[in-house]
């Protein structure tokens, strides 16, 4: 067996499929979790992987805006207790401000930058680890800017001003009034926080991700045809797969997503209408959505076993 019970649980958590189906999928894929997810989806035994983070990394996301530039920074900690610590929150807030002055989104460069209280960001981080007694990491940052317009920040589940678990920035290029742009930006930011777009437009989506969706759709069509005892021509199967990939792109690109506020209007049209109402064209130039712990798998631990092992010493 090339997998463990923990792998079966992980696959169940990812897909919602039954235990035996998960075990069979892992048998078929030699224990490859992602391949097993695709196999279960192709067989109609699992929904698409949830876009909301399935991870449990702790810490905070910070956002900051100055003029026509904004930045989001994620700093991780081991526990939520540290995320509520004033010293840790102060570090995330000041590090985010330092990030505003950087010329790239290079975290290594950010760590070598001067920290407001003296030394560098990395030196302050090292000191925090020593005094708080828990590992912490500056994980990522992303900057957006406009030439003429606004960058609107939004924090969902805020732990403190501009600090929380989901940070969003919306960059709007326009000569429309700041009030109009701020209102539009906040509405768009709330949509982004809820809808989790993967890219600004379909053209910006990762081709590998689209190809994966196309392959799953093709396998699913073949699976369904086999169950029904039908033979579907290859060109029809290809069209179905292409259609599934196109729908995936539409659902996951921000500009083509349906606005959560009315559940009918594509975001591109929301922006266009706002520009017409303002008498000035508005362009949604870029956005950032950082969700705490996104993409980090938390190691499962057996607390009782740890205690027992410690007692045996």
Image (cartoon, rainbow, N blue to C red):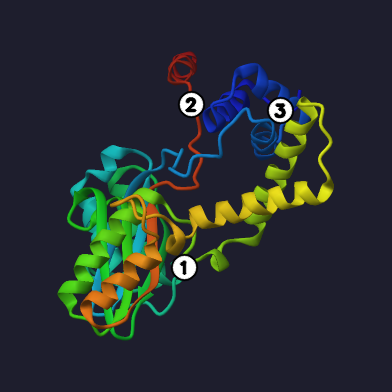
Q: Residues within 10 Å of mark 3 (few under 14, many from 20)?
A: many
The image quarter containing residue 24 is top right
The image quarter containing residue 37 is top right
Nearer-the-camera pick, 255 or 69: 255
Residue 104 is left or right of residue 270, and the answer is right
Mark-to-mark CA distance, 1 and 3:
38 Å
Residue 259 x, y percent position in the rendering? 35, 55
In the drawing, what numbered circle is on residue 301?
2
Nearer-the-camera pick, 263 or 15: 263
Residue 143 x, y percent position in the rendering? 38, 71
Q: Residue at x 51, y 40 (%)?
A: 297
Nearer-the-camera pick, 41 or 7: 41
Residue hosting label 1: 108
Mark-to-mark CA distance, 3 and 2:
22 Å
Nearer-the-camera pick, 39 or 159: 39
Q: Residues within 10 Å of mark 1 (few under 14, many from 20)?
A: few
Q: Is residue 270 visible?
A: yes
Residues marked 3 and 2 touching at CB (< 8 Å): no
169 to 210, vertically: above or below: below
Q: Secondary structure at mark 2?
A: loop
Q: Earlier in the sequence, mark 1 or mark 2?
A: 1
The image quarter containing residue 63 is bottom left
Residue hosting label 3: 26
Residue 156 is left or right of residue 9, and the answer is left
Q: Secondary structure at mark 3?
A: helix
Mark-to-mark CA distance, 1 and 2:
30 Å
Residues marked 1 and 2 touching at CB (< 8 Å): no
């Amino acid at each position: 067996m090339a997998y463990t019970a923990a792998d079966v649980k992980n696959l169940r958590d990812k897909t919602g499929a039954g235990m035996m189906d998960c075990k069979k999928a892992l048998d078929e894929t030699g224990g490859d979790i992602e391949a097993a997810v695709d196999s279960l989806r192709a067989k109609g035994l699992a929904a698409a992987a949830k876009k909301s983070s399935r991870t449990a990394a702790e810490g905070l996301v910070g956002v900051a805006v100055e003029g026509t530039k904004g930045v989001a920074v994620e700093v991780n900690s081991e526990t939520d207790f540290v995320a509520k610590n004033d010293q840790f929150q102060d570090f995330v807030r000041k590090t985010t401000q330092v990030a505003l002055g950087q010329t790239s989104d290079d975290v290594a460069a950010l760590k070598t930058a001067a920290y407001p209280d003296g030394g560098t960001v990395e030196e302050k981080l090292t000191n925090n680890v020593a005094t708080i007694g828990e590992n912490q990491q500056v994980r990522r940052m992303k900057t957006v800017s406009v030439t003429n317009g606004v960058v609107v920040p939004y924090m969902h589940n805020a732990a403190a001003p501009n600090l929380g678990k989901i940070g969003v920035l919306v960059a709007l290029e326009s000569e429309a009034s700041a009030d109009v742009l701020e209102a539009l930006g906040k509405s768009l930011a709330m949509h982004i926080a809820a809808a989790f777009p993967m890219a600004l437009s379909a053209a910006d989506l990762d081709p590998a991700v689209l190809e994966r969706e196309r392959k799953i759709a093709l396998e699913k069509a073949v699976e369904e045809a086999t169950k029904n005892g039908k033979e579907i021509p290859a060109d029809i199967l290809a069209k179905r797969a292409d259609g599934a990939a196109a729908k995936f792109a539409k659902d996951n690109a921000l500009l083509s997503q349906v606005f959560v506020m009315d559940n009918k209007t594509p975001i591109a049209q929301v922006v266009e209408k706002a520009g017409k109402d303002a008498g000035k064209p508005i362009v949604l130039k870029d956005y950032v959505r950082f969700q705490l712990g996104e993409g980090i798998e938390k190691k499962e631990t057996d607390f009782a076993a740890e205690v027992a092992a410690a007692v045996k010493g």
